[in-house]
Amino acid sequence: MNAGAASAPRDGLYLGLISGTSIDAVDAALVEIRGGQPRLCRALGHPIPGPLASALHRVDAQTPLDTLLDLDQQVARLHAEAARRLLSEAKTGAAEVIAIGSHGQTVYHRPHGPYPTTVQLGDPSRLAAETGITTVADFRRRDMALGGQGAPLVPAFHAACLRQAGEDRAVLNLGGIANLTLLPGTDTAPVTGFDTGPANTLLDAWFRQHRDGTYDRDGAWAAGGALHTGLLRRLLNDDYLKRPPPKSTGPEYFSPDWLHRQLDALPGAPPAPQDVQRTLLAFTAQSAVAALAEALPGVRQLYICGGGIHNTALWRALAAALASRCPGCQLTPTTEAGLDPDWLEAMAFAWLAYRTLAGLPGNLPEVTGARQAAPLGGIFPAG
């Protein structure tokens, strides 16, 4: 069903689903929306089984079509499991939920070239059939069809919930990729946003390669390493960081292969693996704060959300970079504004489903570069 087939905004319960580029869990959020304002009712992270996560990490442009199609169905079934588990824990029936907003699992994002495209796995037809709930999905490609990057899409939600007249604010989401939303305190200035570079994707990949486990808890391994200034200079000199917005990226660009090319270009002996981890952490913090300082120099509040908020060493690195580049800017978890930082993105896709069903735009052209604002995604009715 076309997203244009819409009705008046319908208040009630919506369910948001997203599996980020870290590929560790499906985030599921049950959200009550009234008058366009969201309230989180319940949320959970539904783990992605190890074999499926490994298969998703291996997807690239050369992955066989039959493998992609199998993964599309596996991801859809996992998202349906997450939705059913959330509703069971919330003691809520499927009939009480107006719609699911499903972002899916991004495995490829190519916003440039003659045929820009993006791939999110998690067949919405199966999701609607297995949950019995109308599903809104495929959000990114509508924006791309209008000439946009297709990402980031959450800045519209940030603006609705966190913009404050009279104060320049920003939101930094630390998922696999770091996304920055700029919220000027002046009504005449547009909300903007873009991907600043990697957040957890390289940190997690390097940790998996050299240590047991899937991620560096609290950044403890990174904190014990030494900063390699030569490597950091190379990383901060990457062409992506120099591009003006609108721009978006993903792990297909900031990949382990990309990192190995940077390491191979260094003179002398390669740095120790732990020192590389320490340097990647500094790269995440410094690239994000440098982008913020250039785009919104008067910023007074930087809200942090996403899985990276739990990385203590990364938090310290961000605070140090802010003190140097944006003095006077407060570093604050979105909890302080009433939004749980772990579930903010899942909430956003519940909110985007609400807007799509109401025929309201979900993208911000100033963020994505699209020719116009538009309702996003397709509608897959239950039944």
Image (cartoon, rainbow, N blue to C red):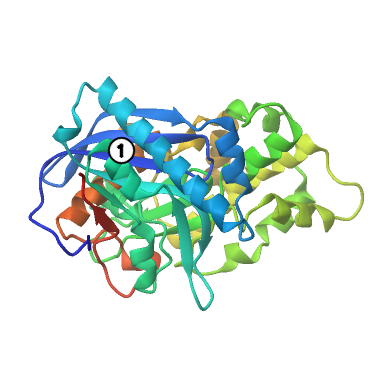
Q: Is residue 316 above or below residue 267?
A: above
What residue would you read off at disc 1?
130
Q: Quadrant of residue 205 in the image?
A: top right
Q: Is residue 335 above or below residue 281?
A: above
Front position in the image: 326 or 223 = 223
Q: Name, please, the residue furthest toward the bottom.
A: 114
Q: Residue 363, how many percent across, how many down?
A: 30, 61
For the question of whether residue 174 can be seen, the reply is: yes
Q: Residue 233, how many percent across, how many down?
A: 72, 56
Q: Residues within 10 Å of mark 1 (few under 14, many from 20)?
A: some
- Quadrant, the C terminus: top left
Q: Is residue 12 left or right of residue 127?
A: left
Which residue does the image show at 77% across and 52% down from the upper left? 260
Q: Name, please, the residue furthest toward the right.
A: 268
Q: Is residue 56 left or right of residue 2?
A: right
Front position in the image: 332 or 37 = 37
Q: Residue 62, how many percent across, how many down?
A: 64, 60
Q: Quadrant of residue 243 in the image?
A: bottom right
Q: Is residue 260 left or right of residue 332?
A: right
Which residue does the image show at 32% across and 75% down from the upper left? 371
Q: Secondary structure at mark 1?
A: helix
Front position in the image: 291 or 308 = 308
- Quadrant, the N terminus: bottom left
For the question of whether residue 19 can be seen, the reply is: no
Q: Residue 87, how many percent across, how many down?
A: 26, 27
Which residue does the image show at 32% across and 33% down from the upper left? 83
Q: Name, please, the residue furthest toward the left.
A: 8
Q: Is residue 333 left or right of residue 86?
A: right
Dot 1 amino acid type: Glu
